[in-house]
Image (cartoon, rainbow, N blue to C red):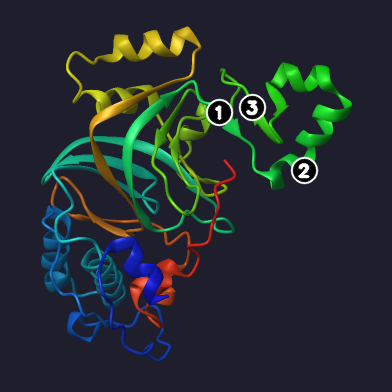
Amino acid sequence: MKTLISALFGISLGLAAPAPAQDESTEIPLADIPTETTALPDHPYPTALQDAYAAESDPARRATIAANIERWRRMPASLGPRYLIVNAAAFEVTLWEGRREMGRWRVIVGTPRTPTPIFQAEVSGVIFNPWWEIPASIAAEGIASMVRNRPAAARQRGYVYQDGRYRQRPGAGNALGLMKLVMPNPYSVFLHDTSNRTLFERDVRALSHGCVRVGDAMGFATELLAARPGWNRARTDEIVASGQTMRIDLPEPIPVYIGYFTAEPAEDGTIRYFADIYNRDRRSAQLSAVEADMEEADSRCRV
């Protein structure tokens, strides 16, 4: 566990033994949270959460805020000049430049049975009109049989068998949609578009097998690529319309932090609380917040 967390966040942990089980409403004073690293990232949210903790009198909310401050403590002290933060609990991804938020988009994340793991990766580019490399487990559920026994139906959906693996051709019906970020990671979890965009209208968007589907994916991709001279939405739309699979690199890679924060500051200075869809806050009363978050970090994206 320690090795995995250290590899993800580049820190050395000396976690205390798990605390005795507590009722979820039990107050957890900051000083009692097991941690070796006490510095907070240079970001407005953890500071605001500390202020909210000091002002909050409700024990349950204090426990929730405390668990989320601990999660921020496990983030790198310097997040980078430009970076992405996915908050799976809020179903959102935000783009930041230093301490300034540059954009916010709705996302779909993993279900409670197939939760989106907590990790850090590096985004180096965007692939437009991507192929979907179909996991063997999904192919075995019916796609492989379709390709073998109903080739016409398989071709209509874009499914092919090439070089020993099942794939789906680029197009409007592709499971990855029209865009996928280049962000290698050990979980095979990616930020991408989707062919079913009506799902973003739902308030609760824990619907995927682990990957993170992004609403307004073309606007999202355009914003990421805006650091390239002359890049605009028209250029994005031109590439998508071509139907050709094309990788466009960012001028400089940026970090993406896949996180899980059930309490987050709002623009008006209040605290937004989100449903604990993965039941990690309850477990963080028994373990450290990071151990609770990492417990299910073996998820694989099945789109």
Q: Residue 74's spot in the image, x, y percent?
A: 25, 67
Q: Are marks 2 and 1 in contact (CB under 8 Å)?
A: no
Instruction: Decide if residue 216 is in sight here.
Output: no
The residue type indicated by label 2 comes to Glu
Specify which label sits upstream in the sequence, 1 or 3.
3
Q: Nearer the viewer, residue 229 or 165?
A: 165
Other residues around mark 1 within 10 Å, as few (<14) / some (14–19) / many (≥20): some
Q: Earlier in the sequence, mark 3 or mark 2?
A: 2
> Is 190 situated above or below 236?
below
Is 177 above or below relative to 236? Answer: below
Q: Is residue 257 or residue 186 the one in the foreground?
A: 186
* Secondary structure state at the residue bearing disc 1: loop
Q: Nearer the viewer, mark 2 or mark 1?
A: 2
According to the picture, the residue beneath numbered tag 1 turns out to be 196
Q: Say which quadrant the N terminus sits in.
A: bottom left
The residue type indicated by label 3 comes to Gln
* Residue 236 position in % (x across, y down): 34, 15
Judge left or right: residue 177 versus residue 11: right
Task: Give the CA separation, mark 3 to mark 2.
Answer: 15 Å
Residue drawn at x 37%, y 57% is 119
Viewer-proximal residue, 261 or 267? 261
Give the quarter of the figure containing the C terminus: top right
- Whether the residues at callouts 3 and 2 have beta carbons within 8 Å, the answer is no
